[in-house]
Image (cartoon, helix red, strand yellow):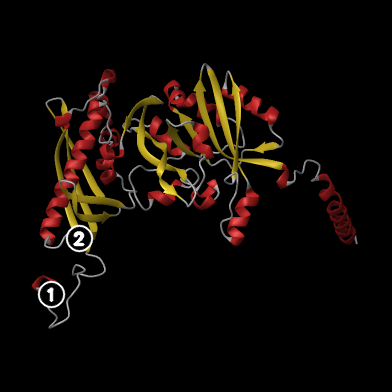
Amino acid sequence: MRALRLAKAALLAGALGLLVLPTAGCWDLRELEHMFYAHAVGVDHRDGEYRLYVQIIDFSALGKQEGRGPQPQETGGSWVGLGVGGSIQEALQDLYISSQRRFYWGHLNSVVLSESVLKQGIETSVGVLSRYHEFRYTHWLFATREPIDDVLLASPILEFSPVYSQLGDPVDTYRQSSIIRPKRMFQLIAEMNEEGRTAFLPLISLERRRWADGQKRYAAIEIRDAVILKDGKWHAVMSDELLFGKRWLVAETERAHLYIKRGSRTEAVLVFRRPKFDIDWREEGGRIRFDLKLSLRAVISEHSAGMTLDTIIRRAEESIRDEIRLTYNEGIKRRTDVLNLLEPVYRNDLKLYRKLTSGGRFPLDESSLRNIDVQVAIASTGKTQDSFRVREAKGKPSRASG
């Protein structure tokens, strides 16, 4: 009987709880449409003041696109607010004053930092922003020399929401053309805090000539060039062309195009995926020497008639060696280990690494990279083995015979 009474009491308490809990749990409920959802943040420093730009998403426009196809939006699917102050936190509070709704930061996707902010140090901006509990460490990080409000207000192609732009989803484009790998906050933090690695930040610019509709031209976001960070600060910029050699030493490279040229004429185009490489080193006379060995598989996307497979392979190997050597030497000019050759030394021979870098010395010069062994294998020549050509009907005289 006692057990039965206890069971009845538990059921009664549960029933009362069901009545009480919904009321108690709704005191601070916020309707979803009553908040602003920050999608991207831009930070600039000008005339002694911080300028904080916040891009918020118009989800009603996004819903129309997903439900009935792209619809013209006067705002391009987003709004951008500006706050100004002597610190980033002060600029944020200045923005709050004119905001019509409460900001929610849990869906923040991207952070764009100006050259002036990065020259002060990335910790000044990202360190402040990441202290708030709604922020995560998965944001995409970008540098820019463009006006930040222009970047955040760039109209997406086909009037799509900024959620689908390179600012919101840079990986999608990287999978088609792998040159500069997008960077999340936690990845950049790891690069800056691990010895032997060089931290890079993708540089965003606006292409104002290539996209247009029947009425006007649009400024499109593109990731071109990269910023080298040293001690968390803007150190130097390297262009795409100077960074081509780096993609062959990045295991995550998903699609790299190699153009085999003779003068300005492109004679063949090869597509590579997921390069495999080994970095060997040895100490000689107090200096370090590196040997690289790369094993690459390619698909021939285009080639001129008359080029043999052996010729394509030989010239591809020469081009890749030249790209790696150029990227390495350009890094040396900037006193930077662009190819991260010192990272395996740090991980596998810490004693040697400490010896080479003692006193803050930069241990590399142009002779440090000794041999580059590249082996290219052709996995496919495309859909057909023969080049496309027009065959004339039998017995039909050619035009030349007149």
Mark 2 residue crowding within 10 angstroms, few (<14) / some (14–19) / many (20+)? some
Relative placement, left or right, of 372 versus 65 is left
Name the residue nearer the viewer: 253 or 152. 152
For residue 151, above or below residue 8: above
Query: Label 2, on which residue?
Result: 378
Say which of 58 and 143 sits in front: 58
The correct choice, above or below, for 123 with respect to 180 in the image is above
Of the residues shown, which amino acid type is indicated by label 2? Ile
Note whether 321 is above or below 387 in the view shown: above
Q: Quadrant of residue 346?
A: top left
Residue under label 1: 398
Q: Residue furthest left?
A: 401
Closer-to-camera residue (165/190)? 165
Nearer to me, 110 or 55: 55
Query: In the picture, residue 80 is in which quadrant?
Result: top right
- Mark 1 element type: loop
Residue 302 in the image: x percent, y percent? 23, 59
Q: CA distance from mark 2 to mark 1?
A: 36 Å
126 with respect to 385 (left or right): right
Amino acid marked by disc 1: Ser
Q: In the image, residue 283 lies at what x, y percent?
A: 16, 31
Q: Position of residue 109 (x, y in %)?
A: 54, 42
Horizontal side of residue 163 vs 333, given as left or right = right
